[in-house]
Image: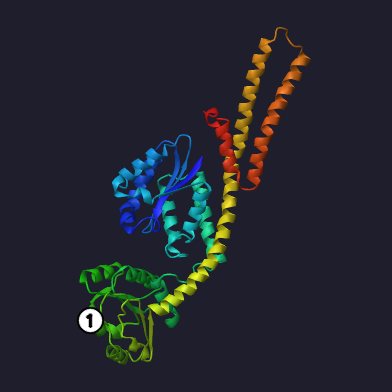
């Protein structure tokens, strides 16, 4: 038995490749049903998010034609051709690395934004789908529940998720510090690109009541606004709606200021000087810096955010080391369980194989003797051959048991099964 992970993520593949491989729930279900019908595949799970596509498989390594199955899978279910360059983006992990990788993924340690919590829910969704398709068994069931436990421990025993490390997330976290609670607040995103979309997701997750989107391209503004049930605004009309806005996040490519100090002063007067929080993450800047001189205006630019990001990243790196200790602890426990799963039947099979060989060779030797042995002599020879077998088996069995105690039995068990051809012994 072998546990495999084959996939790609934001670090190994550009978005142009990732978007071609992304599978929705229906396509993932088809891929799961196909996988478990392939020779040597015992269990399967498909994890597909905007930043990664990964396959987790439990296979019989002696009967699993990996190259053939993987090639057919990507050709038929992902409709990819070899010349499109996706193969060089793939990584492949087995046993320890596959298990620890899943633990890191589920706990947010491998995410684009380290520590982000959404990935745990995405892994749970992938697991539920695999259960529905009857694609998981004893091993993946145990492995997935173990990964959820790792995620919980990382969240509760470290501060990995407590400090924002993306510009958009920092912007929303600063807004939360200013207002205390974003529930009921109205936000305007100037710009409809990736950073604006991430900011919109964070705002919605923290209870923002309404999200307005302004863009130089009206269609882009409408698209992003509709995604979050918001309102599209033309970029040149921002000043007209500013008196409704509590939070303004700017990330446009406009070559000049989109808001002047007099426009912001007028909006403040209209809203009875209730504060406005402004994050200007555009380069060049979208907001006249003199706006920061107005009372009840909180203006942050990229320089302000970079310092926060640097501090937060340093703190997260410290927490990442703590999280890695948790991963290694849980990995040892899982390997211990995995070893016990195969160890007892392997020892039984090993003894049976050795006993069959002993009897065959003893019978052959006795039949070749010219004079028959007495009962006492036969028992002596029988005891001698049993002692030889026991001495030969003592080392492998002792090592497997030692590995089981130390949580490292799976490699030894697999080696013994291969060396003594125990797979064929069991038919």
Question: Outermost residue toward the right?
Answer: 376
- State whether residue 47 appears in this view: no
- Relative to 273, say whether 9 is above or below: above
Picture quarter containing residue 208? bottom left
Q: Position of residue 170 (x, y in %)?
A: 42, 74
- Relative to 135, say whether 302 is above or below: below
Question: How many numbered discs sit on the rendered protein?
Answer: 1
- Compared across the picture, whether 196 is left or right of 150 comes to left
- Relative to 273, say whether 109 is above or below: above
Callout 1 crowding tier (Cα within 10 Å): few <14, some 14–19, many ≥20: few
Q: Secondary structure at mark 1?
A: helix
- Compared across the picture, whether 163 is left or right of 393 comes to left
Q: Position of residue 97 (x, y in %)?
A: 51, 50
Question: Residue drawn 36% across and 69% down?
Answer: 198
Question: Residue drawn 36% across and 48% down?
Answer: 87
Question: Residue drawn 40% across and 58% down?
Answer: 11
Q: In the depicted view, which residue is nearer to us: 278 or 38?
A: 278
Q: Position of residue 394 (x, y in %)?
A: 69, 34
- State whether residue 33 appears in this view: yes
Looking at the picture, the colour scheme in use is rainbow
Q: Position of residue 8 (x, y in %)?
A: 39, 53
Residue denoted by label 1: 237
């Amino acid at each position: 038995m072998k546990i495999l992970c084959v996939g790609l993520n934001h670090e190994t593949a550009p978005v142009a490749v990732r978007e071609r491989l992304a599978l929705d729930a229906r396509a993932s279900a088809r891929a799961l049903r196909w996988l478990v019908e392939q020779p040597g595949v015992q269990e399967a799970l498909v994890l597909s998010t905007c930043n990664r596509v990964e396959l987790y498989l439990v296979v019989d390594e002696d009967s699993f034609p990996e190259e053939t199955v993987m090639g057919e899978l990507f050709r038929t279910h992902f409709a990819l051709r070899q010349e499109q360059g996706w193969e060089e983006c793939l990584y492949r992990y087995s046993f320890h690395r596959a298990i620890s990788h899943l633990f890191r993924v589920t706990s947010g340690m491998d995410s684009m934004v380290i520590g982000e919590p959404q990935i745990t829910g995405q892994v749970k969704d992938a697991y539920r789908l695999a259960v529905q398709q009857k694609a998981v068994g004893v091993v993946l069931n145990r492995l997935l529940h173990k990964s959820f436990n790792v995620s919980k421990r990382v969240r509760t025993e470290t501060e990995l998720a407590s400090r924002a490390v993306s510009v958009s997330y920092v912007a929303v976290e600063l807004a939360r510090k200013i207002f205390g609670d974003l529930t009921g607040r109205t936000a305007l995103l100037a710009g409809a690109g990736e950073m604006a979309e991430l900011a919109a997701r964070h705002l919605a997750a923290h209870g923002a009541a309404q999200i307005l989107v302004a863009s130089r391209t009206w269609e882009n503004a409408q698209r992003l606004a509709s995604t979050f049930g918001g309102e599209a605004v033309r970029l040149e009309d921002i000043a007209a709606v500013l008196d409704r806005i509590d939070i303004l996040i700017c990330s446009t490519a406009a070559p000049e200021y989109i808001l002047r100090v007099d426009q912001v002063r007028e909006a403040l007067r209209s809203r009875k000087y209730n504060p406005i929080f402004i994050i200007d993450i555009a380069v060049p800047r979208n907001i006249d810096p003199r706006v920061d001189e107005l009372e009840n205006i909180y203006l942050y630019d990229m320089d302000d955010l970079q310092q926060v990001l640097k501090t937060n990243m340093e703190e997260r790196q410290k927490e990442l080391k703590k999280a890695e200790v948790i991963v290694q602890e849980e990995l040892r426990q899982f390997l211990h369980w995995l070893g016990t799963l195969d160890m007892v039947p392997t020892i039984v099979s090993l003894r049976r194989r050795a006993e069959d060989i002993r009897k065959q060779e003893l019978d052959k030797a006795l039949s070749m003797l010219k004079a028959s042995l007495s009962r006492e002599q036969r028992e002596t020879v029988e005891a001698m051959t049993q002692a030889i077998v026991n001495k030969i088996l003592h080392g492998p069995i002792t090592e497997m048991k030692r590995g089981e105690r130390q949580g490292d039995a799976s490699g030894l068990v697999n080696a013994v099964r291969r060396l003594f051809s125990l797979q064929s012994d069991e038919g």
